[in-house]
Amino acid sequence: MKIKLDKTVREALMVDLRNYMDSELDHALGQFEAEFLLDFIISKLGPHFYNQGVYDAQASVRQQMENLVESLYLLEK
């Protein structure tokens, strides 16, 4: 699955990358460099962040289901 970003989000992230590289690493990135770096981050790191989000969502749903089951047991007479 390929991670696709909205054009506005993509542009904002490239600005963030350029600002970070300039202020923290004293290395100015051009537009193309920022785009290539963002593509690299998305392709290599994005799936890991996505998967972690899925795992966190699964844990949250699992906890909610356990709470629901407990609530149903409390309704028994």
Image: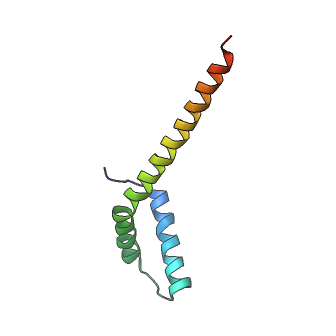
Against 45, residue 70 (above or below) is above
Relative side of 39 to 57, left or right: left
Q: Position of residue 36 (x, y in %)?
A: 34, 72
Q: Is residue 22 visible?
A: yes
Quarter of the figure with residue 3: bottom left
Q: Residue at the spot x=38%, y=73% of the render?
A: 37
Task: Relative to 35, say whether 7 is above or below.
Answer: above
Residue 48 quadrant: bottom left
Of 11 and 47, the residue lying toward us: 47
In the picture, the quarter occupied by the C terminus is top right
Residue 66 in percent (x, y) is at: 57, 32
Extreme residue toward the left, this view: 1
Residue located at (53% from left, 78% from top): 20
The number of callouts visible is: 0
Q: Residue furthest top?
A: 77
Above or below — where is 66 with respect to 5?
above
Judge whether residue 6 can be spotted in this image: no
- Residue farthest front in this picture: 77
Q: Residue at x 34, y 65 (%)?
A: 44
At 53% across and 37% down in the image, what residue appears? 61
Camera-nearest residue between 53 and 7: 53
Across and down, in percent, residue 5 comes to 42, 55
- Residue nearest the observer in this picture, 42 or 33: 42
